[in-house]
Amino acid sequence: MLDLNTKKIKKNAYRVTKVRGETASRVRVPGGLLTAELLPLIQNIAETFGNGRIHLTTRQGFEIPGIKYTDMDAVNALLQPIIDKLEINQEIPGKGYTSAGTRNISACIGSNTCPFATYNTTNFAQKMEKEIFPNDLHFKVAFTGCANDCIKTRMHDFGIIGMTEPQYEKERCMGCQACVKACKKKSVDALSVENYRIVRNTEKCVGCGECVINCPTRAWTRSPVTYYRLVIMGRTGKRNPRLAEDFLVWATEDAIIKIIKNTYGFVNNYIDREAPGGKEHIGYIIDRTGFEEYKKWAMEGVELDPRTIVKGPVYWSGIHYDGK
Amino acid sequence: MGYQTTAEKINAIFSDLSKDYLIYAPKRFVGDGTFTYIDTIRYGEITDLAEIEFAEKSNYSFKEVLLPISETLFYFTENEMKEADAPKKGAIVFLRSCDLHGLKRMDTIYLENGGVDTYYKRLRDHTKFILMGCENSFENCFCVSMGTQTSEDYDAYLKVDGDNVLVDSRWDYLDAALAGATQAPVIADSVTANDTVVTIPETVPQTLFDDPFWEEYGNRCIACGRCNFVCPTCTCFTMQDIFYTDNGKAGERRRVWASCHVDGYTDMAGGHAFRNDKGQRMRFKVLHKVNDYKRRFGTHMCIGCGRCDDVCPEYISFANCINRLNTLVNDTVKEEN
Ligand code: HEM
Ligand code: HEM
Ligand code: SF4
Ligand code: SF4
Ligand code: SF4
Ligand code: SF4
Ligand code: SF4
């Protein structure tokens, strides 16, 4: 006879599935990068306690279905080396993941491999994971290397899009216009030519770095510091799916971490305690409180780089199925 | 004369020399590369031996010291013009053997090909060259095939070996400055073989001018010009006349690097461009490097540094192109016989 506390099970990153008696274990992989040596461990769990299959989740984790509820402790023991190796914060060692609300932090492949990436997305994702996990509140955070947004940060509560501030050394420029063509054809057409030299429209520039990539003489190079566009409160779902909107542009790493951490305070304060499962998306809370109230909480104690542009008020559109 | 001395001593000599010279050497520019977190090794001013990148091949050559990417030649107003002042100081340039051969190619073009280029000459006359040895061949180098793996035309050879610095000086100033240092025979490190070996056809028949051989390159090359810009022996420039925006009657003339792969190179008055096909641009460059130049000046232009192969974003190998061309020429000659 099974006597389960489903709330506890879910909090422990196990799913209550449609198959009576069977659960599924969700393995977090912050930043979506793991060493191949962990795959046999995941394989072993699936073959020993699951049904031999593994599902790759949209958030770059693994979901191992077909596990008997009674085997959860055994599975937790097998998860431990994976948790250790990926340096996941854990409240009680040996007990698996002690929260599931704050989802795995996803990231595109980033500067480890991608020529367009402006920073190491995996590193920032892992750093963010350490800052905010474990936590039961429902937060979805994703990192993407450039404005191409391959990880689709705009479908997340927080999307972090890398930006470089192109540095122009005019004495190294011979006017080939490779940068101008690249910006026009692949980006936002922010470059123009004046007296054979290049002028960057700083209001238009999205910091994608195409100019830097295409300059054959290193007249354009990257800024030593990476900047980020922080887009917020994108979501899918039944009522009002919508894309995240810009909150900060040319923001620094520290500011972004602080804002996301501040948001936990905001949510704790305003979350609808009557919501089903005690679960309410941040976006809907902000819809209720108004953006300015959220901004007040989010910006508390945040130090901004002089370059940073703070948007406000932020409006979201999307599709309204809820008649509002 | 050969010497064994210390980095400290050399740095002190540099410090004295800096009154009259700017010292240029390959340096690591952190994060300066095409892609994020990629460095470039290129020429910059140094004051200390420790700043020099000895371990890697520089991505760009020394040529930008003598032929700046962008150089103002003169300033003009309505009726007058004034030449840009010559650099106040001379230059000392650290470079490898192949590049030292590249210097000869530059000299040929700027000093011995008809007129003398005063802008080049006035800096060239005040430049000293310090050879950096090569203990091992780098990737894509084919200096041995081009006969540029050693060079005697240096003012000094310098090798850092732990705390010791070995110097072979052919420069009176340096001999005087090193008087008292331990004398020792110093022979420049050089390689005797490269992984990349090229065979250059003796002559390239005119019939290959339009050969389909070049078409493949036409489909691959994106005309970015990187192969030309990194090349120590590409000497082409173009002119830019600038009228200052606040006063349209005054301005300056600059000369800037040009590349035969990049759009605009063959543009003429009236807008006609006569070499639009990128395969034909490849043909023009390749034959300039290893055919035409030799017919005119007696040596090949290319010195085998392999930087063009290092840099091409489309993985077009110039070295492999020469070898393929050689096969094609041999086959063509056989057919004709
Ligand atoms: C079918 C007719 C012609 C063609 C295809 C032609 C093509 C060219 C080309 C390719 C250049 C070299 C441009 C460069 O180096 O950037 C050139 C230069 C020149 N052409 Fe022609 N040309 C033609 C007729 C003429 C005629 C009829 C004249 C004079 C009456 C002329 C006078 C010149 C001069 C003075 C130069 C400049 C030489 C220099 O750069 O030092 N061309 N032409
Ligand atoms: C004292 C008289 C002249 C001088 C000193 C002179 C000088 C030059 C020079 C230096 C160039 C090469 C420019 C470059 O490399 O970009 C050139 C190009 C040219 N000149 Fe002259 N030129 C003179 C008269 C003329 C005349 C009278 C004509 C035509 C009737 C002419 C037609 C051309 C043409 C067609 C070009 C080629 C333009 C191009 O390559 O785009 N020039 N000239
Ligand atoms: S960073 Fe991107 S948008 Fe900005 S100037 Fe360069 S190519 Fe254009
Ligand atoms: S790509 Fe580089 S060299 Fe070419 S115009 Fe742009 S800045 Fe100048
Ligand atoms: S053509 Fe290539 S290998 Fe030859 S000198 Fe130029 S860059 Fe070096
Ligand atoms: S290869 Fe092209 S750019 Fe280089 S020197 Fe020859 S013509 Fe000029
Ligand atoms: S570097 Fe490669 S792609 Fe660029 S111009 Fe040269 S051959 Fe063409």
Image (spheres, rainbow, N blue to C red):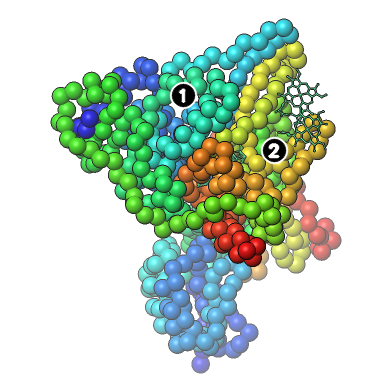
Disc 2 residue: CB within 8 Å of ligand 6: yes
Please give the name of the residue rendered at 69% of the width and 29% of the height, measured from the top-left corner. Answer: A196
Where on the picture, by quarter, is residue A234?
Answer: bottom right
Callout 2–callout 1 Cβ contact below 8 Å: no
- Observer-nearest of A297 and B15: B15
Query: How many numbered discs sit on the rendered protein?
Result: 2
- Observer-nearest of B110 and A280: B110
Where on the picture, by quarter, is residue B285?
Answer: top right
- How many C-alpha atoms fall within 10 Å of the one at disc 1: few (<14), some, or many (≥20)? some
Residue A202 location (% of width, % of height): 67, 34
Give the quarter of the figure containing the C terminus of chain A.
Answer: bottom right
Please say whether residue B195 is visible from this viewpoint.
yes
Mark 2–mark 1 Cα distance, whole angstroms, equals 26 Å
The chain to which mark 2 is attached is B
Please give the name of the residue rendered at 69% of the width and 38% of the height, measured from the top-left corner. Answer: B265
- Observer-nearest of B9 and B209: B209
State the SS at label 1. helix
**Residue B265, labelled with which disc?**
2
Tag 2: amino acid: Tyr
Mark 2 vs 1, N-terminal side = 1
Please give the name of the residue rendered at 44% of the width and 72% of the height, measured from the top-left corner. Answer: A36
Tag 1: amino acid: Arg
**Residue A310, labelled with which disc?**
none
Above or below, A15 relative to A191: below
Please say whether residue B30 is visible from this viewpoint.
no
Residue B135 location (% of width, % of height): 31, 48
**Residue B124, labelled with which disc?**
1
